[in-house]
């Protein structure tokens, strides 16, 4: 070994060069040879390993080995070959420079630790991508767990590098680190909170990837596309991305629409405001006219017979409509809307269908439609709801009712 390290030195001495010059030239030539060997071995190792991985991947059904190639795991493994060559050759190259040997050894050991971390990172990313291909795991916060493992590995790796550079013991380093735990807690506060939140989100199944969430505090209204250790990414419906701290899912309120998505329909809950002064009793002539509306024709016949029988039995004076029992245009309109909603093809008939009168307001009497559309897709849902209310608003005049509209002119001061 020693003879190999002084091969060029002996040649230079024979050529008549001074010892000092021969030593430096010998070291430079050996260093150049080492560098060339490193590049050649790295190139050959990468090609052999990558080709071997490709051949192996083609012969298997699993996607895991293909993902290893995509995340360049063979490339990092191939770097081990030139690292071994350098570790074996540098004592020969610097045999005449013992002062260089220790620093170079430390640099190589630190590089070895970092290379191991990059290899591990590549494998973890492969696992992350592989788990996301599994239907049972694709909506779980896999990224958070991988990041936690990687965080611990980087802490241990950096600790090893620090120990190699300073020469102190590994346990002494962590003892010193424990004394600075308050500072570390402050630095990694968000990471620690995110880690705890990620576990609770996963265990309680609070949020999944693909869920539609609304969080007004952060301006988020869209689908969850990624759950990381520190942030949850929400793609809003205008295609912008909102980043929410993971721990905010526990500390702040938000709305998850998963229940609606997994149910049989999407809720429609909207009211029409009817002007109170347009509500009135219906005369016999008006009832006969409304019988032409097919959806409520049978209802009006049966209801009219029931009311007439009641009033006759009790000898009610019907010279005034207010006496006895009567039908109102608002009540008949409410029944018409109920029948219309129940017969609408886009409404889920197995879920609640209701048309109800709400408490009077200064803007009129609200008539609310409460039902569920069968189609839960946003654009279709909006179309269905608009179609329903287009019809309802157009039907109002047939019942001699009026929609409330704010009269700005009436509020202006008179000249």
Image (cartoon, rainbow, N blue to C red):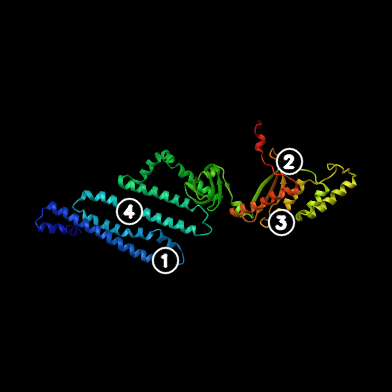
Badge 2 density bin: few <14, some 14–19, many ≥20, Cα 10 Å? some
Question: Which numbered dot is residue 276?
Answer: 2
**Residue sitting farthest toward the bottom:** 59
Q: Which residue position is annotated with label 4? A: 112
Label 1 or label 3, whichever lies nearer to me, is 3
Q: Mark 4, mark 1: which one is toward the viewer?
A: 1
Label 3 neighbourhood size at 10 Å, few (<14), some (14-19), many (20+)?
few
Could you tell which of marks 3 and 2 lies nearer the N-terminus? 2
Task: Decide which of tag 1 and tag 3 comes sooner along the chain.
Answer: 1
Q: Residue at x 26, y 51 (%)?
A: 104
Give the image location of residue 304, x and y in percent: 83, 50
**Label 1, label 3: how far apart the Cα atoms are:** 57 Å
Decide if residue 70 is on the left or right side of residue 35. right
Residue at mark 1: 57
Q: Earlier in the sequence, mark 1 or mark 2?
A: 1
User: Cα distance, mark 1 to mark 2?
Assistant: 75 Å
* Sooner in the amino-acid sequence: mark 3 or mark 4: 4
79 lies left or right of 238: left
* Helix, strand or loop status at disc 2: helix
List the residue tagged with mark 3.
343
Are discs 1 and 3 less than 8 Å apart at CB?
A: no
């Amino acid at each position: 070994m020693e003879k190999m390290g002084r091969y060029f030195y002996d040649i230079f001495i024979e050529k008549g060069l001074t010892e000092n010059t021969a030593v430096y030239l010998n070291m430079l030539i050996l260093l150049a040879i080492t560098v060339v060997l490193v590049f050649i071995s790295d190139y050959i190792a990468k090609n052999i390993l990558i080709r071997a991985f490709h051949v192996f991947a083609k012969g298997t059904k699993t996607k895991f080995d293909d993902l290893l190639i995509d995340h360049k795991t063979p490339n990092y493994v191939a770097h081990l070959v030139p690292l071994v060559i350098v570790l074996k050759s540098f004592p020969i190259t610097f045999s005449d420079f013992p002062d260089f040997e220790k620093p170079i050894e430390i640099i190589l050991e630190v590089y070895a630790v970092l290379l191991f971390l990059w290899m591990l990172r590549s494998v973890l990313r492969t696992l992350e991508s592989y788990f996301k291909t599994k239907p049972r795991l694709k909506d779980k916060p896999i990224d958070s767990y991988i990041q936690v493992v990687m965080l611990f590995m980087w802490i241990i790796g950096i600790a090893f590098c620090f120990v190699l550079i300073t020469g102190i013991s590994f346990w002494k380093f962590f003892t010193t680190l424990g004394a600075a735990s308050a500072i570390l807690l402050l630095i990694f506060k968000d990471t620690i909170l995110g880690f705890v939140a990620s576990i609770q989100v996963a265990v309680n199944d609070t949020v999944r990837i693909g869920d539609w969430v609304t969080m007004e505090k952060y301006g988020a209204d869209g689908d969850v596309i990624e759950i990381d250790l520190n942030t949850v990414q929400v793609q809003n419906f205008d295609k912008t991305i909102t980043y929410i701290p993971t721990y905010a899912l526990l500390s702040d309120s938000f709305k998850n629409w998963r229940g609606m998505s997994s149910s049989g329909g999407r809720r429609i809950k909207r009211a029409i405001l009817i002007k109170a002064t347009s509500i009135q009793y219906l005369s016999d002539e008006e009832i006969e006219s409304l019988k032409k509306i097919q959806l409520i024709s049978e209802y009006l016949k049966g209801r009219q017979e029931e009311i007439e029988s009641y009033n006759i039995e009790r000898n009610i004076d019907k010279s005034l409509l207010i006496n006895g029992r009567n039908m109102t245009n608002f009540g008949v309109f409410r029944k018409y809307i109920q029948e219309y909603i129940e017969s609408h093809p886009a409404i889920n008939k197995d879920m609640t269908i209701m048309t109800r009168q709400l408490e009077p307001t200064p803007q009129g009497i609200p008539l609310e439609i409460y039902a569920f559309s069968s189609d839960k897709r946003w654009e279709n849902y909006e179309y269905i709801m608009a179609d329903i209310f287009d019809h309802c608003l157009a039907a109002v005049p047939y019942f001699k009712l009026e929609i409330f509209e704010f009269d700005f002119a009436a509020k202006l001061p008179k000249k």
